Amino acid sequence: MIQMYEKLGVSSEVYQYGESVLLELKERFEKVDAVAEFNQAKVLAAMQKNRVGASCFAATTGYGYDDVGRDNLERVYADTFHTESALVRPQITCGTHALTVALSANLLPGDELLSPVGAPYDTLEEVIGIRPSTCSLKEYGVSYRQADLKPDGSIDYDAIRASVNEKTKMATIQRSKGYATRPTFSVKQIGELIAFLKELKPDIICMVDNCYGEFVETIEPSDVGADLVVGSLIKNPGGGLAPIGGYICGKKDYVNRCAYRLSAPGLGQEVGANLGLMPAFYQGFFLAPTVVAGALKGAIFAANLYERLGFHVIPNGTESRHDIIQAVELGSREGMIAFCKGIQMAAPVDSYADPLPWAMPGYESEVIMAAGAFVQGSSIELSADGPIRPPYAVYFQGGLTWYHAKLGILLSLQKLIDAGLTKIG
Ligand SMILES: *Cc1c(COP(=O)(O)O)cnc(C)c1O
């Protein structure tokens, strides 16, 4: 084993250091496996209930009328998330697009959107119009208000009460920390927040940005009152096989509006060919609970390994997990680059590439990304990224298998050691 790892660029010291960290993690990993087992059963039951058969895998083209596979996949998603309805489409190009559809379909001029959990994910700033942008919600007369989190990262209920007004139509609740160093919210915490919002305003539409959260727990935000849950298929629920796509699950009326926004008024869910992607969508969803478990083990391993070396990690080594993201504060631009070089070197695709910071569309700061993915930009595959700004945190996520995630983490440490930025023993 040591020779094998040496061949891949990991010294025997780093490998053995990793093994010593892993000795402590047996119980944690067992819990992760138990959640995966539960979620595997949940997905399987939804597939069996909806009688998934070979006819579901046929490709459709053109308008895609009477697309049996597409319509049934949406029922499988709805049953898994325990919602009335679902929109799961390759025509939804990414997570930001799915969120944009959900927001712009359900907000009309004069309405106000509230984020009760502080600033949203970077790309949503332009969607909402927090940063001026062409075609933002703001341009269409939708205003925005934000209740910031308390300094310790907890929800500020007084600030929320002060923010809700007669115009407040919808709340956007981001489950995962995204590019922030706040804690990720548990599904239970999201449920408490939704209950509070509904008490203040019973008809408020609560949408949860579920990116990176799917299958991390045995329940989803839709089990605790969310009206809409939204995410990307090149993250958790695509299981690494979906080459594109997004989903919106929730109450029928709200999902219907999303379908009309995505295609056209009058057309809605009836159009949208599957282009031969159904096998990947079904099989990816089937594999997703196990893939998410592997990614979670990688995140837990990284937290414990880097914490032991004195780095600030979020979540810390022992905290409970509510998404697959692990932030490691490396304290410098050089640290971020070395970490990302290690992740890149571990990749099955583009392992020879050299990650460098660059200006990415949708993001305000320069961003560094390491990814050698079968699907471009897929972050359920092993990847690391982060904006080049203090505290110089790298957000590490994914790994189609636990063993690959492990290699990536060991190589990131190797690169930090080689650059003289940390040492073991
Ligand atoms: C990834 C992500 C998004 C945006 O998804 P893209 O597919 O990158 O457009 C939105 N919110 C959160 C919390 C995310 O992690």
Image (cartoon, grey):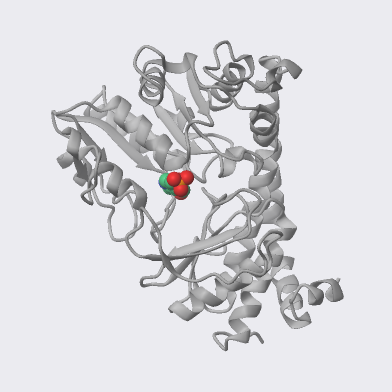
Quarter in which the C terminus is drawn: bottom right
Q: Give how far across and how far down residue 141 sits, in percent.
A: 16, 33
Residue at the spot x=66%, y=79% of the render?
414
For residue 403, say whether it is visible.
yes
Q: Front-most of 49 and 224?
A: 49
Residue at the spot x=71%, y=14% of the render?
51
- Which residue reaches farthest front? 62
Left or right position of 94 against 27: left
Q: Give how far across and how far down residue 273 sits, in percent.
A: 56, 22
Q: Give how far across and how far down residue 20 sits, in percent.
A: 73, 73
> Would you place residue 168 above or below residue 306 in this image?
above
Quarter in which the N terminus is drawn: bottom right
Q: Residue 353 occupies which quadrant of the picture?
A: bottom right
For residue 215, say whether it is visible.
no
Q: Give how far across and how far down residue 361 sits, in percent.
A: 37, 55
Q: Front-most of 319 and 344?
A: 344
Left or right position of 37 against 242: right
